[in-house]
Amino acid sequence: MKEKHFFENHEGILKIGIPYTKKLFEKNSKFQNVKILKTKGYGNMLINDNVIMTCERDEFIYHEMMAHVPLFLHSDPQDVLIIGGGDGGTAREVLKHKKVKNCIMVEIDSTVVKACKKHLPQTASVFKHAKLDLRIEEGTRFLKDKQKAFDVILVDSSDPIGPSSLLFGKNFYKNIYKALKAEGIVIAQAGNFFYNLTHQKQSLKMCLDLGFKKIGIYSYNNLTYPPGCWNFLFASKKIHPLKDFKAQRVKQSKIKFQYYNSDIHISSFTKPEFVKKQLKLLGVL
Amino acid sequence: MKEKHFFENHEGILKIGIPYTKKLFEKNSKFQNVKILKTKGYGNMLINDNVIMTCERDEFIYHEMMAHVPLFLHSDPQDVLIIGGGDGGTAREVLKHKKVKNCIMVEIDSTVVKACKKHLPQTASVFKHAKLDLRIEEGTRFLKDKQKAFDVILVDSSDPIGPSSLLFGKNFYKNIYKALKAEGIVIAQAGNFFYNLTHQKQSLKMCLDLGFKKIGIYSYNNLTYPPGCWNFLFASKKIHPLKDFKAQRVKQSKIKFQYYNSDIHISSFTKPEFVKKQLKLLGVL
Protein backbone atom coordinates (compact mmCIF):
# COMPACT_ATOMS: atom_id res chain seq x y z
CA MET A 1 0.00 0.00 0.00
CA LYS A 2 1.33 3.42 -0.91
CA GLU A 3 2.23 5.48 2.13
CA LYS A 4 0.21 8.61 2.88
CA HIS A 5 2.25 11.80 3.23
CA PHE A 6 1.50 15.24 4.56
CA PHE A 7 3.42 17.77 2.43
CA GLU A 8 4.53 21.22 3.56
CA ASN A 9 6.15 23.86 1.36
CA HIS A 10 9.01 26.06 2.52
CA GLU A 11 9.72 29.29 0.69
CA GLY A 12 9.07 27.55 -2.64
CA ILE A 13 12.51 25.94 -2.50
CA LEU A 14 11.93 22.94 -0.25
CA LYS A 15 9.05 20.55 0.24
CA ILE A 16 8.88 18.23 3.19
CA GLY A 17 6.79 15.10 3.35
CA ILE A 18 5.77 13.39 6.59
CA PRO A 19 4.51 9.80 6.27
CA TYR A 20 1.46 9.21 8.44
CA THR A 21 -0.75 6.26 9.19
CA LYS A 22 -3.98 7.90 10.34
CA LYS A 23 -5.85 11.18 10.44
CA LEU A 24 -6.97 11.47 14.08
CA PHE A 25 -8.77 14.81 13.87
CA GLU A 26 -9.80 17.41 11.32
CA LYS A 27 -12.07 20.41 11.66
CA ASN A 28 -12.44 23.82 10.08
CA SER A 29 -12.75 26.13 13.05
CA LYS A 30 -13.83 29.77 12.81
CA PHE A 31 -10.17 30.65 12.30
CA GLN A 32 -8.35 27.84 10.54
CA ASN A 33 -8.18 24.22 9.49
CA VAL A 34 -7.04 22.14 12.48
CA LYS A 35 -5.69 18.65 11.88
CA ILE A 36 -3.94 15.99 13.96
CA LEU A 37 -2.10 13.16 12.20
CA LYS A 38 -0.62 10.01 13.64
CA THR A 39 2.77 10.08 11.90
CA LYS A 40 5.25 7.29 11.31
CA GLY A 41 8.20 8.86 13.07
CA TYR A 42 7.11 11.97 14.97
CA GLY A 43 4.19 10.80 17.10
CA ASN A 44 0.94 12.72 16.87
CA MET A 45 1.31 15.96 14.97
CA LEU A 46 -0.80 19.15 15.10
CA ILE A 47 -1.17 20.93 11.76
CA ASN A 48 -3.00 24.26 11.38
CA ASP A 49 -3.81 25.49 7.86
CA ASN A 50 -1.40 22.92 6.46
CA VAL A 51 1.56 24.13 8.54
CA ILE A 52 3.13 21.86 11.18
CA MET A 53 2.64 23.34 14.64
CA THR A 54 4.00 20.72 17.00
CA CYS A 55 4.49 16.98 17.41
CA GLU A 56 5.10 14.57 20.25
CA ARG A 57 8.64 13.61 19.30
CA ASP A 58 10.34 16.96 19.57
CA GLU A 59 7.87 19.43 21.12
CA PHE A 60 10.03 19.53 24.26
CA ILE A 61 12.71 21.51 22.44
CA TYR A 62 10.59 24.47 21.34
CA HIS A 63 8.64 24.59 24.60
CA GLU A 64 11.66 24.34 26.92
CA MET A 65 13.58 26.98 25.00
CA MET A 66 10.66 29.39 24.88
CA ALA A 67 9.90 29.12 28.61
CA HIS A 68 13.14 28.48 30.49
CA VAL A 69 15.38 31.13 28.93
CA PRO A 70 13.25 34.07 30.23
CA LEU A 71 12.03 32.34 33.41
CA PHE A 72 15.53 31.67 34.66
CA LEU A 73 16.61 35.21 33.74
CA HIS A 74 13.84 36.94 35.66
CA SER A 75 14.58 37.08 39.39
CA ASP A 76 10.96 36.62 40.44
CA PRO A 77 8.63 35.60 37.60
CA GLN A 78 5.26 35.50 39.37
CA ASP A 79 2.91 36.52 36.58
CA VAL A 80 3.31 34.96 33.17
CA LEU A 81 1.20 35.48 30.06
CA ILE A 82 1.19 33.12 27.11
CA ILE A 83 -0.40 34.35 23.90
CA GLY A 84 -1.28 31.42 21.66
CA GLY A 85 0.27 28.10 22.60
CA GLY A 86 -2.99 26.15 22.34
CA ASP A 87 -1.28 22.76 22.55
CA GLY A 88 -0.28 23.50 26.17
CA GLY A 89 3.44 22.70 25.90
CA THR A 90 4.70 26.18 26.77
CA ALA A 91 2.38 26.39 29.80
CA ARG A 92 3.61 22.98 30.96
CA GLU A 93 7.21 24.27 31.04
CA VAL A 94 6.26 27.63 32.61
CA LEU A 95 4.46 25.86 35.45
CA LYS A 96 7.56 23.85 36.35
CA HIS A 97 8.84 27.10 37.89
CA LYS A 98 7.65 27.29 41.48
CA LYS A 99 7.88 31.08 41.60
CA VAL A 100 5.12 31.37 39.00
CA LYS A 101 1.89 32.15 40.84
CA ASN A 102 -0.35 32.82 37.91
CA CYS A 103 -0.11 31.77 34.29
CA ILE A 104 -2.70 33.20 31.94
CA MET A 105 -2.94 31.65 28.51
CA VAL A 106 -4.86 33.49 25.81
CA GLU A 107 -5.61 31.23 22.86
CA ILE A 108 -7.86 32.40 20.04
CA ASP A 109 -9.05 28.98 18.89
CA SER A 110 -10.84 26.58 21.24
CA THR A 111 -10.76 23.89 18.54
CA VAL A 112 -6.98 23.66 18.90
CA VAL A 113 -7.27 23.19 22.66
CA LYS A 114 -9.99 20.55 22.30
CA ALA A 115 -8.09 18.62 19.64
CA CYS A 116 -4.89 18.65 21.72
CA LYS A 117 -6.68 17.58 24.91
CA LYS A 118 -7.79 14.47 23.07
CA HIS A 119 -4.78 13.68 20.87
CA LEU A 120 -1.74 15.44 22.39
CA PRO A 121 -2.07 14.69 26.13
CA GLN A 122 1.72 14.99 26.47
CA THR A 123 1.34 18.76 26.17
CA ALA A 124 -2.37 19.32 26.84
CA SER A 125 -2.57 17.56 30.20
CA VAL A 126 -1.38 20.90 31.63
CA PHE A 127 -4.90 22.28 31.20
CA LYS A 128 -5.81 20.58 34.49
CA HIS A 129 -3.14 22.61 36.34
CA ALA A 130 -4.58 24.80 39.14
CA LYS A 131 -2.34 27.79 38.34
CA LEU A 132 -3.28 27.86 34.66
CA ASP A 133 -5.96 30.33 33.63
CA LEU A 134 -7.03 29.58 30.05
CA ARG A 135 -8.93 32.30 28.15
CA ILE A 136 -10.34 31.68 24.71
CA GLU A 137 -9.89 35.16 23.32
CA GLU A 138 -8.01 37.18 20.74
CA GLY A 139 -4.55 38.06 22.12
CA THR A 140 -4.38 41.69 21.00
CA ARG A 141 -7.81 42.42 22.50
CA PHE A 142 -6.86 40.81 25.83
CA LEU A 143 -3.70 42.92 26.02
CA LYS A 144 -5.25 46.32 25.29
CA ASP A 145 -6.00 47.47 28.84
CA LYS A 146 -3.24 45.63 30.69
CA GLN A 147 -0.69 47.78 32.51
CA LYS A 148 2.43 46.47 34.26
CA ALA A 149 0.68 43.19 34.88
CA PHE A 150 3.21 40.58 33.75
CA ASP A 151 6.81 39.63 34.44
CA VAL A 152 7.17 37.47 31.34
CA ILE A 153 5.09 37.37 28.14
CA LEU A 154 5.52 34.48 25.71
CA VAL A 155 4.15 34.97 22.20
CA ASP A 156 3.71 31.34 21.18
CA SER A 157 2.26 32.00 17.75
CA SER A 158 2.36 30.40 14.35
CA ASP A 159 3.84 32.27 11.38
CA PRO A 160 2.64 35.76 10.40
CA ILE A 161 -0.20 34.48 8.23
CA GLY A 162 -3.74 33.49 9.23
CA PRO A 163 -4.97 34.14 12.78
CA SER A 164 -1.44 34.92 14.05
CA SER A 165 -0.79 37.82 11.68
CA LEU A 166 -1.90 40.37 14.29
CA LEU A 167 0.81 39.15 16.65
CA PHE A 168 3.68 40.58 14.66
CA GLY A 169 2.82 44.29 14.38
CA LYS A 170 3.97 47.44 16.15
CA ASN A 171 0.67 48.05 17.94
CA PHE A 172 0.81 44.61 19.45
CA TYR A 173 4.33 45.14 20.77
CA LYS A 174 3.40 48.56 22.09
CA ASN A 175 0.74 46.85 24.19
CA ILE A 176 3.19 44.14 25.22
CA TYR A 177 5.58 46.83 26.45
CA LYS A 178 2.78 48.47 28.44
CA ALA A 179 1.64 45.16 29.91
CA LEU A 180 5.11 44.25 31.20
CA LYS A 181 6.35 45.21 34.66
CA ALA A 182 9.64 47.11 35.11
CA GLU A 183 11.84 44.02 34.74
CA GLY A 184 9.62 42.45 32.09
CA ILE A 185 10.75 40.14 29.30
CA VAL A 186 8.95 39.17 26.10
CA ILE A 187 9.85 36.15 23.97
CA ALA A 188 8.36 35.52 20.54
CA GLN A 189 8.60 32.90 17.83
CA ALA A 190 10.81 34.48 15.18
CA GLY A 191 11.36 32.15 12.24
CA ASN A 192 14.96 31.38 11.35
CA PHE A 193 18.18 33.08 10.25
CA PHE A 194 18.23 31.34 6.90
CA TYR A 195 14.83 32.42 5.61
CA ASN A 196 13.74 35.32 7.82
CA LEU A 197 16.75 37.50 8.66
CA THR A 198 15.28 40.63 7.07
CA HIS A 199 12.04 40.25 9.01
CA GLN A 200 13.99 39.51 12.20
CA LYS A 201 15.96 42.73 11.80
CA GLN A 202 12.72 44.69 11.42
CA SER A 203 11.24 43.12 14.57
CA LEU A 204 14.37 43.85 16.60
CA LYS A 205 14.48 47.45 15.36
CA MET A 206 10.79 47.83 16.31
CA CYS A 207 11.46 46.57 19.85
CA LEU A 208 14.32 49.04 20.25
CA ASP A 209 12.13 51.88 18.99
CA LEU A 210 9.43 50.95 21.51
CA GLY A 211 11.83 51.33 24.41
CA PHE A 212 13.00 47.80 25.13
CA LYS A 213 16.54 48.06 26.50
CA LYS A 214 18.00 44.63 25.74
CA ILE A 215 17.08 42.89 22.52
CA GLY A 216 18.37 39.69 21.03
CA ILE A 217 17.81 36.55 19.04
CA TYR A 218 18.49 33.06 20.32
CA SER A 219 18.45 29.67 18.64
CA TYR A 220 17.41 26.07 19.12
CA ASN A 221 17.60 23.01 16.90
CA ASN A 222 14.60 20.90 16.20
CA LEU A 223 13.47 18.08 13.99
CA THR A 224 10.26 19.28 12.42
CA TYR A 225 10.61 22.92 11.38
CA PRO A 226 13.03 23.07 8.44
CA PRO A 227 15.79 24.12 8.20
CA GLY A 228 16.17 22.86 11.79
CA CYS A 229 17.77 25.87 13.45
CA TRP A 230 15.01 28.21 14.64
CA ASN A 231 14.98 31.45 16.57
CA PHE A 232 13.21 33.28 19.33
CA LEU A 233 13.13 37.04 19.68
CA PHE A 234 14.17 38.27 23.13
CA ALA A 235 13.29 41.79 24.35
CA SER A 236 13.45 43.05 27.90
CA LYS A 237 13.12 46.31 29.79
CA LYS A 238 16.19 45.71 31.91
CA ILE A 239 17.54 42.15 32.06
CA HIS A 240 20.51 41.14 29.91
CA PRO A 241 20.14 37.55 28.66
CA LEU A 242 23.79 36.66 29.30
CA LYS A 243 25.22 39.14 31.84
CA ASP A 244 22.21 38.67 34.12
CA PHE A 245 22.06 34.90 33.71
CA LYS A 246 22.72 32.99 36.93
CA ALA A 247 23.44 29.35 36.23
CA GLN A 248 22.88 28.38 39.87
CA ARG A 249 19.18 29.17 39.49
CA VAL A 250 18.94 26.40 36.91
CA LYS A 251 20.60 23.91 39.24
CA GLN A 252 18.58 24.98 42.27
CA SER A 253 15.27 24.66 40.41
CA LYS A 254 15.71 20.87 40.19
CA ILE A 255 13.63 20.96 37.00
CA LYS A 256 14.38 18.01 34.74
CA PHE A 257 15.11 19.10 31.18
CA GLN A 258 15.40 17.21 27.95
CA TYR A 259 16.95 20.04 25.90
CA TYR A 260 17.67 23.16 28.00
CA ASN A 261 20.68 23.47 30.30
CA SER A 262 22.97 26.34 31.38
CA ASP A 263 25.43 25.82 28.54
CA ILE A 264 22.61 25.74 26.00
CA HIS A 265 21.22 28.98 27.49
CA ILE A 266 24.51 30.75 26.85
CA SER A 267 25.39 29.21 23.50
CA SER A 268 21.88 29.77 22.12
CA PHE A 269 22.74 33.48 21.79
CA THR A 270 25.79 32.75 19.61
CA LYS A 271 25.45 33.60 15.94
CA PRO A 272 27.16 32.47 12.76
CA GLU A 273 29.24 35.15 11.08
CA PHE A 274 26.73 35.91 8.30
CA VAL A 275 24.07 36.64 10.95
CA LYS A 276 26.41 38.54 13.27
CA LYS A 277 27.39 40.92 10.47
CA GLN A 278 23.75 41.69 9.72
CA LEU A 279 22.75 42.22 13.34
CA LYS A 280 25.71 44.03 14.83
CA LEU A 281 24.58 47.43 13.59
CA LEU A 282 21.51 47.02 15.77
CA GLY A 283 23.59 46.13 18.83
CA VAL A 284 21.83 42.80 19.03
CA LEU A 285 22.94 40.04 21.38
CA MET B 1 4.19 23.14 -16.02
CA LYS B 2 4.57 20.84 -13.05
CA GLU B 3 7.79 21.46 -11.15
CA LYS B 4 10.44 18.76 -11.11
CA HIS B 5 11.56 17.65 -7.65
CA PHE B 6 14.46 15.61 -6.39
CA PHE B 7 13.24 13.54 -3.41
CA GLU B 8 15.41 12.22 -0.58
CA ASN B 9 14.28 9.91 2.19
CA HIS B 10 15.38 10.29 5.80
CA GLU B 11 15.09 7.35 8.16
CA GLY B 12 11.72 6.46 6.61
CA ILE B 13 10.05 9.23 8.62
CA LEU B 14 10.74 12.31 6.52
CA LYS B 15 10.94 12.93 2.80
CA ILE B 16 12.42 16.12 1.41
CA GLY B 17 11.77 17.46 -2.05
CA ILE B 18 14.02 19.96 -3.80
CA PRO B 19 12.50 21.72 -6.82
CA TYR B 20 14.97 21.95 -9.69
CA THR B 21 14.94 23.43 -13.15
CA LYS B 22 17.64 21.44 -14.95
CA LYS B 23 19.79 18.34 -14.69
CA LEU B 24 23.30 19.63 -15.44
CA PHE B 25 25.19 16.35 -15.13
CA GLU B 26 24.56 12.65 -14.59
CA LYS B 27 26.90 9.69 -14.85
CA ASN B 28 27.24 6.27 -13.31
CA SER B 29 30.89 6.13 -12.28
CA LYS B 30 32.66 2.95 -11.20
CA PHE B 31 31.52 3.72 -7.65
CA GLN B 32 28.20 5.54 -7.69
CA ASN B 33 25.63 7.60 -9.53
CA VAL B 34 26.83 11.22 -9.68
CA LYS B 35 24.34 13.95 -10.47
CA ILE B 36 24.33 17.75 -10.44
CA LEU B 37 21.01 19.61 -10.48
CA LYS B 38 20.32 23.30 -10.95
CA THR B 39 17.87 23.84 -8.08
CA LYS B 40 15.37 26.60 -7.54
CA GLY B 41 16.63 27.80 -4.19
CA TYR B 42 19.96 26.15 -3.38
CA GLY B 43 22.09 26.82 -6.46
CA ASN B 44 23.79 23.87 -8.13
CA MET B 45 23.55 20.72 -6.05
CA LEU B 46 25.76 17.59 -6.06
CA ILE B 47 23.88 14.35 -5.44
CA ASN B 48 25.64 10.96 -5.14
CA ASP B 49 23.52 7.78 -5.18
CA ASN B 50 20.42 9.94 -4.58
CA VAL B 51 21.80 11.56 -1.43
CA ILE B 52 22.49 15.31 -1.34
CA MET B 53 26.22 15.96 -0.89
CA THR B 54 26.59 19.71 -1.19
CA CYS B 55 25.08 22.78 -2.82
CA GLU B 56 26.19 26.30 -3.61
CA ARG B 57 23.87 28.07 -1.17
CA ASP B 58 25.12 26.63 2.10
CA GLU B 59 28.28 24.62 1.39
CA PHE B 60 30.28 27.25 3.27
CA ILE B 61 28.84 26.07 6.59
CA TYR B 62 29.91 22.43 6.43
CA HIS B 63 33.29 23.25 4.89
CA GLU B 64 34.19 26.06 7.30
CA MET B 65 33.20 24.03 10.34
CA MET B 66 35.09 20.93 9.22
CA ALA B 67 38.32 22.82 8.47
CA HIS B 68 38.61 25.77 10.84
CA VAL B 69 37.83 24.07 14.16
CA PRO B 70 40.90 21.77 13.99
CA LEU B 71 43.14 24.15 12.05
CA PHE B 72 42.81 26.91 14.63
CA LEU B 73 43.32 24.42 17.47
CA HIS B 74 46.56 23.00 16.10
CA SER B 75 49.51 25.28 16.84
CA ASP B 76 51.30 24.53 13.56
CA PRO B 77 49.16 22.62 11.02
CA GLN B 78 51.65 22.13 8.17
CA ASP B 79 50.49 18.82 6.73
CA VAL B 80 46.80 18.24 6.18
CA LEU B 81 45.10 15.20 4.67
CA ILE B 82 41.54 15.26 3.35
CA ILE B 83 39.90 11.91 2.66
CA GLY B 84 36.96 12.33 0.31
CA GLY B 85 35.79 15.89 -0.21
CA GLY B 86 35.67 15.63 -4.01
CA ASP B 87 33.79 18.90 -4.43
CA GLY B 88 36.83 20.83 -3.15
CA GLY B 89 35.11 22.93 -0.46
CA THR B 90 37.04 21.52 2.48
CA ALA B 91 40.38 21.97 0.68
CA ARG B 92 39.42 25.58 -0.14
CA GLU B 93 38.97 26.34 3.58
CA VAL B 94 42.11 24.42 4.64
CA LEU B 95 44.23 26.40 2.19
CA LYS B 96 43.11 29.71 3.70
CA HIS B 97 45.49 28.84 6.57
CA LYS B 98 48.94 30.16 5.69
CA LYS B 99 50.69 27.66 7.96
CA VAL B 100 49.50 24.78 5.78
CA LYS B 101 52.39 23.76 3.52
CA ASN B 102 50.92 20.68 1.99
CA CYS B 103 47.34 19.54 1.60
CA ILE B 104 46.82 16.07 0.18
CA MET B 105 43.32 15.17 -0.89
CA VAL B 106 42.47 11.53 -1.52
CA GLU B 107 39.22 11.16 -3.42
CA ILE B 108 38.07 7.77 -4.68
CA ASP B 109 35.92 9.01 -7.56
CA SER B 110 37.35 11.17 -10.35
CA THR B 111 33.84 11.62 -11.78
CA VAL B 112 32.88 13.71 -8.73
CA VAL B 113 35.91 15.96 -9.21
CA LYS B 114 35.24 16.37 -12.93
CA ALA B 115 31.55 17.14 -12.41
CA CYS B 116 32.32 19.72 -9.71
CA LYS B 117 35.05 21.40 -11.76
CA LYS B 118 32.45 22.08 -14.41
CA HIS B 119 29.32 22.78 -12.35
CA LEU B 120 30.45 23.76 -8.83
CA PRO B 121 33.35 26.17 -9.48
CA GLN B 122 32.60 27.87 -6.15
CA THR B 123 34.20 24.90 -4.40
CA ALA B 124 36.15 23.18 -7.19
CA SER B 125 38.21 26.17 -8.30
CA VAL B 126 40.56 25.15 -5.46
CA PHE B 127 41.90 22.34 -7.64
CA LYS B 128 44.16 24.92 -9.32
CA HIS B 129 45.83 25.73 -5.95
CA ALA B 130 49.60 25.05 -5.93
CA LYS B 131 49.61 23.53 -2.43
CA LEU B 132 46.83 21.04 -3.20
CA ASP B 133 47.94 17.52 -4.11
CA LEU B 134 44.92 15.61 -5.44
CA ARG B 135 45.15 11.81 -5.56
CA ILE B 136 42.42 9.71 -7.12
CA GLU B 137 42.71 6.70 -4.85
CA GLU B 138 40.88 4.73 -2.19
CA GLY B 139 41.37 6.43 1.20
CA THR B 140 42.04 3.35 3.33
CA ARG B 141 44.68 2.11 0.88
CA PHE B 142 46.42 5.49 0.81
CA LEU B 143 46.59 5.54 4.60
CA LYS B 144 48.01 2.05 5.16
CA ASP B 145 51.74 2.85 5.20
CA LYS B 146 51.59 6.42 6.53
CA GLN B 147 53.31 7.05 9.86
CA LYS B 148 53.22 10.35 11.77
CA ALA B 149 52.78 12.19 8.49
CA PHE B 150 49.88 14.55 9.18
CA ASP B 151 48.91 17.24 11.67
CA VAL B 152 45.23 17.22 10.76
CA ILE B 153 43.14 14.59 8.95
CA LEU B 154 39.68 15.49 7.70
CA VAL B 155 37.37 12.61 6.80
CA ASP B 156 35.01 14.38 4.43
CA SER B 157 32.88 11.39 3.54
CA SER B 158 29.26 10.70 2.72
CA ASP B 159 27.17 8.44 4.96
CA PRO B 160 28.33 4.90 5.86
CA ILE B 161 26.80 3.32 2.76
CA GLY B 162 28.26 2.95 -0.74
CA PRO B 163 31.91 3.88 -1.37
CA SER B 164 32.24 5.62 1.99
CA SER B 165 31.39 2.58 4.12
CA LEU B 166 35.07 1.72 4.63
CA LEU B 167 35.65 5.12 6.23
CA PHE B 168 33.75 4.31 9.41
CA GLY B 169 35.47 1.16 10.71
CA LYS B 170 38.04 0.45 13.42
CA ASN B 171 40.82 -0.51 11.00
CA PHE B 172 40.47 2.80 9.25
CA TYR B 173 40.73 4.74 12.51
CA LYS B 174 43.70 2.63 13.61
CA ASN B 175 45.49 3.79 10.46
CA ILE B 176 44.36 7.38 11.05
CA TYR B 177 45.90 7.24 14.53
CA LYS B 178 49.15 5.91 13.11
CA ALA B 179 49.22 8.52 10.34
CA LEU B 180 48.83 11.44 12.75
CA LYS B 181 51.77 13.23 14.35
CA ALA B 182 52.00 13.62 18.15
CA GLU B 183 49.61 16.60 18.29
CA GLY B 184 47.36 15.25 15.55
CA ILE B 185 43.63 15.85 15.21
CA VAL B 186 41.06 13.96 13.15
CA ILE B 187 37.63 15.33 12.22
CA ALA B 188 34.94 13.21 10.60
CA GLN B 189 31.41 13.67 9.33
CA ALA B 190 29.23 12.12 12.03
CA GLY B 191 25.53 12.41 11.18
CA ASN B 192 23.35 14.09 13.78
CA PHE B 193 22.22 13.76 17.40
CA PHE B 194 18.61 13.16 16.44
CA TYR B 195 19.06 10.15 14.17
CA ASN B 196 22.56 8.82 14.86
CA LEU B 197 23.32 9.13 18.59
CA THR B 198 23.88 5.38 19.06
CA HIS B 199 26.31 5.24 16.17
CA GLN B 200 28.05 8.39 17.41
CA LYS B 201 28.57 6.80 20.82
CA GLN B 202 30.15 3.75 19.18
CA SER B 203 32.51 5.91 17.11
CA LEU B 204 33.58 7.90 20.15
CA LYS B 205 34.16 4.76 22.20
CA MET B 206 36.24 3.34 19.34
CA CYS B 207 38.43 6.48 19.24
CA LEU B 208 39.00 6.25 22.99
CA ASP B 209 39.92 2.57 22.70
CA LEU B 210 42.44 3.38 19.96
CA GLY B 211 44.30 5.79 22.22
CA PHE B 212 42.95 9.20 21.26
CA LYS B 213 43.13 11.38 24.38
CA LYS B 214 40.48 14.02 23.69
CA ILE B 215 37.28 13.08 21.96
CA GLY B 216 34.18 15.09 21.27
CA ILE B 217 31.27 15.96 19.06
CA TYR B 218 30.54 19.41 17.72
CA SER B 219 27.60 20.85 15.82
CA TYR B 220 26.69 23.18 12.99
CA ASN B 221 23.39 24.20 11.46
CA ASN B 222 22.77 23.95 7.77
CA LEU B 223 19.98 24.19 5.27
CA THR B 224 20.20 21.04 3.22
CA TYR B 225 20.87 18.07 5.50
CA PRO B 226 17.74 17.45 7.59
CA PRO B 227 17.17 17.83 10.46
CA GLY B 228 19.46 20.87 10.14
CA CYS B 229 21.73 20.38 13.13
CA TRP B 230 24.64 18.13 12.12
CA ASN B 231 27.74 16.92 13.88
CA PHE B 232 31.43 16.33 13.43
CA LEU B 233 33.45 13.84 15.42
CA PHE B 234 36.58 15.33 17.01
CA ALA B 235 39.46 13.14 18.21
CA SER B 236 42.97 14.26 19.05
CA LYS B 237 46.12 12.85 20.57
CA LYS B 238 46.67 15.83 22.84
CA ILE B 239 44.78 19.04 22.00
CA HIS B 240 41.62 19.91 23.93
CA PRO B 241 39.06 21.59 21.64
CA LEU B 242 38.07 24.22 24.23
CA LYS B 243 40.88 24.52 26.79
CA ASP B 244 43.51 24.74 24.04
CA PHE B 245 41.49 27.09 21.85
CA LYS B 246 43.11 30.49 21.37
CA ALA B 247 40.64 33.00 19.99
CA GLN B 248 43.41 35.42 19.03
CA ARG B 249 44.60 32.96 16.36
CA VAL B 250 41.26 33.40 14.62
CA LYS B 251 41.56 37.18 14.66
CA GLN B 252 45.21 37.16 13.60
CA SER B 253 44.52 34.89 10.64
CA LYS B 254 42.47 37.61 8.92
CA ILE B 255 40.49 34.86 7.20
CA LYS B 256 37.02 36.04 6.17
CA PHE B 257 34.33 33.64 7.36
CA GLN B 258 30.67 33.34 6.53
CA TYR B 259 29.77 30.93 9.36
CA TYR B 260 32.72 30.22 11.69
CA ASN B 261 33.86 32.62 14.40
CA SER B 262 35.37 32.24 17.89
CA ASP B 263 32.01 32.16 19.65
CA ILE B 264 30.70 29.54 17.22
CA HIS B 265 33.84 27.46 17.85
CA ILE B 266 33.11 27.35 21.56
CA SER B 267 29.34 27.00 21.43
CA SER B 268 29.52 24.25 18.78
CA PHE B 269 30.66 21.86 21.54
CA THR B 270 27.55 22.56 23.66
CA LYS B 271 24.97 19.80 23.79
CA PRO B 272 21.27 19.63 24.58
CA GLU B 273 20.46 17.78 27.78
CA PHE B 274 19.26 14.58 26.07
CA VAL B 275 22.60 14.30 24.27
CA LYS B 276 24.70 15.31 27.29
CA LYS B 277 23.14 12.55 29.39
CA GLN B 278 23.97 9.95 26.76
CA LEU B 279 27.54 11.10 26.24
CA LYS B 280 28.71 11.98 29.71
CA LEU B 281 29.58 8.40 30.62
CA LEU B 282 32.15 8.47 27.85
CA GLY B 283 33.65 11.73 29.14
CA VAL B 284 32.85 13.38 25.84
CA LEU B 285 33.22 17.12 25.29
Image (tube, coloured by chain):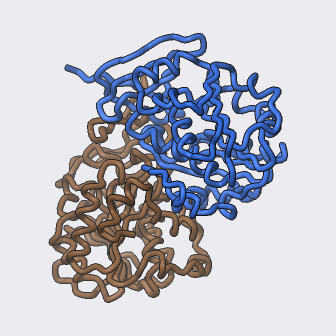
Chain colours: A brown, B blue
* A115 up-or-down from A181: above or below: above
Q: Which quadrant, please, contains the N terminus of chain A? A: top left
Residue at 37%, 78% (x, y): give it. A103
* A127 up-or-down from A253: above or below: above
Q: Which quadrant, please, contains the C terminus of chain A? A: bottom left
Q: Position of residue B92 (x, y in %)?
A: 52, 37
Q: Is residue A143 visible?
A: no
Q: Is residue B249 visible?
A: yes
Q: Quadrant of residue A31?
A: bottom left
For this view, does B85 lie left or right of residue A19? right
Residue at 22%, 64% (x, y): give it. A167
Q: Position of residue A82 (x, y in %)?
A: 33, 71
Q: Position of residue B109 (x, y in %)?
A: 59, 18
Residue at 63%, 35% (x, y): give it. B103
For this view, does B155 lie left or right of residue B282? left
Q: Choose between B104 and A168: the one closer to the eye.
A: B104
For this view, does A174 lie left or right of residue A105? left
* A74 up-or-down from B81: above or below: below
Residue at 35%, 34% (x, y): give it. B42
Q: Choose between B42 and B97: the one closer to the eye.
A: B97
Q: Position of residue A77 (x, y in %)?
A: 42, 83
* A234 up-or-down from A53: above or below: below
Q: Give the total number of marks visible in the rendering.
A: 0
